[in-house]
Image: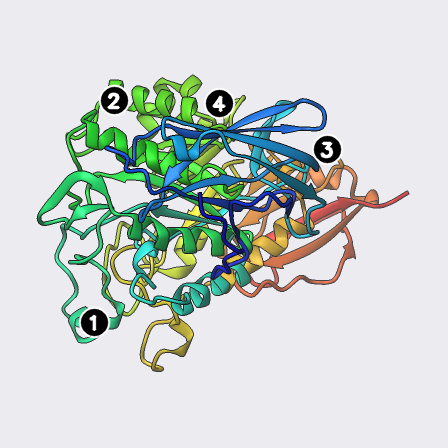
Amino acid sequence: MVLLVSVAGNSQMKKERYTSRVISIPKWEVVDISFKSNEEAVAPYTTDFSAIFTNEKGKQQKVLGFYNGKNEWIIRFSSNEEGQYTYETASVLKALNPKKGKVKVVASSNTNHGGIVIKEEDPQHFYYEDGTPYFLLAFECDWLYALDYHTEKSLPKTDHLLDLIKENGFNQIVMNVFSYDVSWQKDAKLAQHPEHEFGGPKDIFPFLGTNDTPDYSALNPEFFQKLDRTISSMHDKRIASHLMIYVWNKLVAWPDMNSEADNMYFDYVVKRYQAFPNMVWDISKEALYYGRADEAYIHGRIERLRKADQFNRLVSVHDFKYCSNFPEKVDFISTQNWSHNLYDKMLAAQTKFKDKPVFNIEHGGYEEAPYTVFTGDYTNAETCLRRNYMCLFAGVYTTYYWQGASWNAIIYNPFEQPEDFKKPKFEYFQHMMKLFTAFDFSKMKPTPWQNGSAYNLTNDEKTVLLYIHKENYGIDAAFLKKESSKRTVQWFNSVTGEFTSVAAMQDSGKFISPWSGKADAILISELRQP
């Protein structure tokens, strides 16, 4: 066993070579404890290696280790409790068994609220581990793994894009471990800008070999080391990774289902990323489409994941049919609904699944970009925004897609492009986050019997939000006028984020948005403080 000094990483994830001294980390932060062994393992990616961590109260947690290439083995650890831990490793390899050490977990920073969980007393909403409400607002970027793959010592493009995503209110990225290429015809303009094309990488593959000539005998540790950097940077920026372990329609040369290679890959992903508090698992994008997987396979993958994941991260499946038929298998319901009556469909799902959050992971709105990548049914920015609000006012969570970042084309710096490039309207979602920070989404309930020509969310403190389309001339909302002497009224512009001043409610006439015909708006009415 070789004892070495601490190794600096590209992010805040702490990396320590095995040593007898105490390692110190904050609660909900991640540390890699690295072990060197010159003993050859016949199948290192499936060789058993683990550690039992025991705190001062006697509470124990098993952590599965993994092989990192070049005779290096990693125990990746994080904790949701402060205190002193001792650990002891176990392995079939003599050089790794048993090794003892200590980790001291100190108080977390003010910005780190822990992993994403679901409270038993409020099962339709997400929270952080410390009890802070988590208003899930997702951004799809399937090829994020590739953005800085060939940049050795930093993540300039990735960090730039992640900073934009964070600044504009998004706090979760729907992403693939690996995607290869799209099957649809690509926009000819994309060929003029190869710096924005990430499809069809010839030298990136999670296994040995390439996607064209795969070698399933072992995994490619470099691929996962590069993915570590991205996941870790997301954790540092407090952005969750909604990690889809498989994707069937992006031309990936996956090994046969349930083969040794398939199990090796799946188990390794779970072992390697479960310690990250910002991790949310998704078995596969569109899991039961394309004639690939069946229900039995997805059942088996979920059971396999739950057995291996010692941190109990949330699990879902990007397939509403599966989630609807087997809600007991998943922690939250993922749906992919493009319907014209989106609000009604989402309200029906929210009503049906009273004990789980519902997340519309793909609502058919794909905002236009300089390249036509995948249009879905809606590309206008305000229409896509409206569809997100339709989900929210039905009480379910939602996702944003921009054609310039969701798939093989990634424009990581859209606001630094030439003037004739179509710029995304990220700021719309910054405004959305501002609204639901001011009015806690976890406290708001859809009340369709009071919709009228708007859409109603109400909380227990008698705050009412009415989402009103810009085509609406005016709404009576007579139920509000019953308490007009006690209520205030205020308006919010969904496009600009502007709030009007708070005013006393009038007891007659229609409520007419100050932006009627110009932008969808939200009428905010609150009971006056006594």
Q: Secondary structure at mark 3?
A: loop
Q: CA distance from mark 3 to mark 1?
A: 53 Å
**What crowding class fits label 2: few (fewer than 14 Cα within 10 Å), some (14-19), or many (20 or more)?**
some
Q: Circle 4 is placed at which residue position?
A: 353
From the viewer's side, name the closer residue of 505 and 328.
Answer: 328
Front label number (3 vs 2): 2
Q: CA distance from mark 3 to mark 4?
A: 21 Å
First in sequence, mark 3 or 1: give its number.
Answer: 1
**What crowding class fits label 1: few (fewer than 14 Cα within 10 Å), some (14-19), or many (20 or more)?**
few
Q: Position of residue 484 (x, y in %)?
A: 78, 44
Residue at the (25%, 72%) spot, across then down: 195
Residue at the (33%, 31%) spot, across then down: 267
Q: Secondary structure at mark 1?
A: helix
The amino acid type of the residue labelled 1 equals Pro
In the drawing, does residue 171 fall left or right of residue 252?
Answer: right
Q: Position of residue 405 (x, y in %)?
A: 33, 60
